[in-house]
């Protein structure tokens, strides 16, 4: 999957990838719900294979302001996970986690930042635990980082990293929502192309 | 006036007054702006990597600092620009998160800035202004009427170069 060609995934491979991502999402939703003590819904994952330069479009547009929690993956599966929250959602989430009335937080403090990072770690970690069990491989998440900025700027180093080898990115996208306080956001997994091969092989669809 | 000309990631465009060229959400990428104030011709490149040595896919000159500068100069020449009346401004090259990328991409933002400076020095183009480094995203608009560059960021608002 090195080079300029669009990586080809058969319908069966796409289904399999969607299936394991759904299980990961289910696990993540459970962990997130427990953390907030409220019901968090996650959508069926969508999988986009897009030119690197178009990736910001799939994350809401390059200038969209988000709180982004970034986790780099090491181990057998390399890649990136980015959790994005619209600013208002990040504030509401901080309020819920600190037991405050929704609307209290207007700016992210040190405490708010570490709570959002912890949320990122728990949601990402529970997704990855499910994924690594299914593909029977080691995935090590690094310590998450948080920033509030334009999504295009937050992710361009991920694209730079990918652009050394390929011209296309695989973006696995899951939307989540907590209806009561209107907390919503996106979970993005961008596996490196070689890691995608490992995943497909592990679930037995590498030759389909 | 027409809408501003948009430059994507690993993309470059040149044009003439009174047009405007914009690029959005630079993180570690760098915008190299060239402007010939006499002939009122300018260009903007949104580069991702310092040089072709960093990638297996090298066909797009707009992706690398070392190839984007000569390419842009060539295209500007076709519109009547001359090198001796052209100057440069560079923007971007932030490090959004510390210590995330490993070698050879460690602090890639700073490397992109250095590579842009080298590529410009090689062509004897003066850098008259820069807004580089830091840890926040930036969007850039170039006004080809006068070469003014407006940099917008969440952290610092508007910075005129």
Image (tube, grey):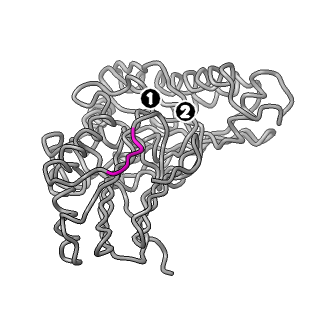
Callout 1 secondary element? loop
Instruction: List the single residue furthest toward the bottom.
Output: B1
Chain letter for mark 2: A
Residue B78 vs residue A198, the one in the foreground:
B78
Q: Which secondary structure is most common in the magenta stretch?
A: strand
In the rendered structure, the answer to whether residue A26 lies left or right of residue A96 reads left
Quick check: is B129 in the magenta stretch?
yes
Q: Position of residue B82 (x, y in %)?
A: 19, 70
Against A59, is A81 above or below? above
Residue B44, can we see it? yes
Magenta span of residues: B128-132
In the image: residue B39, left or right of residue A21: left
State the residue position of label 1.
Answer: B97
Q: Is residue B69 left or right of residue A74?
A: left
Q: How far from the left and from the top, in percent, is residue A82?
A: 49, 35
Q: Quadrant of residue B35?
A: bottom left
Residue closest to the eye, B149 or B5 = B149
Q: Residues within 10 Å of mark 2 (few under 14, many from 20)?
A: many
Indicate the secondary structure of the residue bearing disc 2.
Answer: strand
Please state the total of marks drawn on the protein image: 2
């Amino acid at each position: 999957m090195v080079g300029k060609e669009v990586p080809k995934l058969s319908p069966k491979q796409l289904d399999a990838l969607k299936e394991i991502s759904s299980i990961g999402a289910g696990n993540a939703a459970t962990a997130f719900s427990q953390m907030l003590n409220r019901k968090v819904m996650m959508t069926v994952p969508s999988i986009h294979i897009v030119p690197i330069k178009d990736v910001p479009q799939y994350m809401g547009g390059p200038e969209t302001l988000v709180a982004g929690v970034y986790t780099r993956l090491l181990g057998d599966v390399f890649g990136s996970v980015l959790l994005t929250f619209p600013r208002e959602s990040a504030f509401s989430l901080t309020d819920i986690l600190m037991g405050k009335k929704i609307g209290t937080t207007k700016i992210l403090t040190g405490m708010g930042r570490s709570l959002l990072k912890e949320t990122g770690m728990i949601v990402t970690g529970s997704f990855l635990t499910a994924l690594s069990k299914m593909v029977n491989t080691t995935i090590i998440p690094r310590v998450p980082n948080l920033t509030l900025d334009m999504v295009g700027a937050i992710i361009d180093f991920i694209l730079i990293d990918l652009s050394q080898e390929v011209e296309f990115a695989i973006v696995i996208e899951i939307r989540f929502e907590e209806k009561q306080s209107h907390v919503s956001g996106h979970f993005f997994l961008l596996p490196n192309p070689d890691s995608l091969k490992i995943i497909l092989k592990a679930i037995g669809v590498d030759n389909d | 006036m027409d809408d501003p000309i948009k430059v994507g990631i690993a993309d470059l465009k040149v044009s003439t007054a009174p047009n405007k060229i914009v690029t959005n959400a630079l993180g570690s990428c760098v915008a190299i702006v060239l402007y010939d104030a006499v002939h009122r011709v300018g260009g903007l490149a949104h580069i991702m990597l310092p040089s072709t040595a960093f990638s297996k896919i090298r066909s797009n000159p707009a992706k690398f600092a070392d190839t984007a500068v000569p390419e842009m100069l060539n295209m500007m020449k076709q519109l009547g620009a001359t090198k001796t009346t052209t100057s440069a401004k560079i923007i971007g090259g932030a490090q959004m998160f510390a210590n995330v990328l490993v070698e050879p991409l460690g602090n890639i933002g700073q490397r992109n800035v250095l590579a842009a400076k080298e590529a410009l020095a090689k062509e004897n183009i003066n850098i008259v202004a820069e807004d580089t480094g830091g840890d926040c995203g930036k969007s850039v608009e170039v006004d080809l009427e006068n070469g003014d560059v407006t940099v917008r960021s969440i952290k610092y608002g508007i910075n005129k170069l």
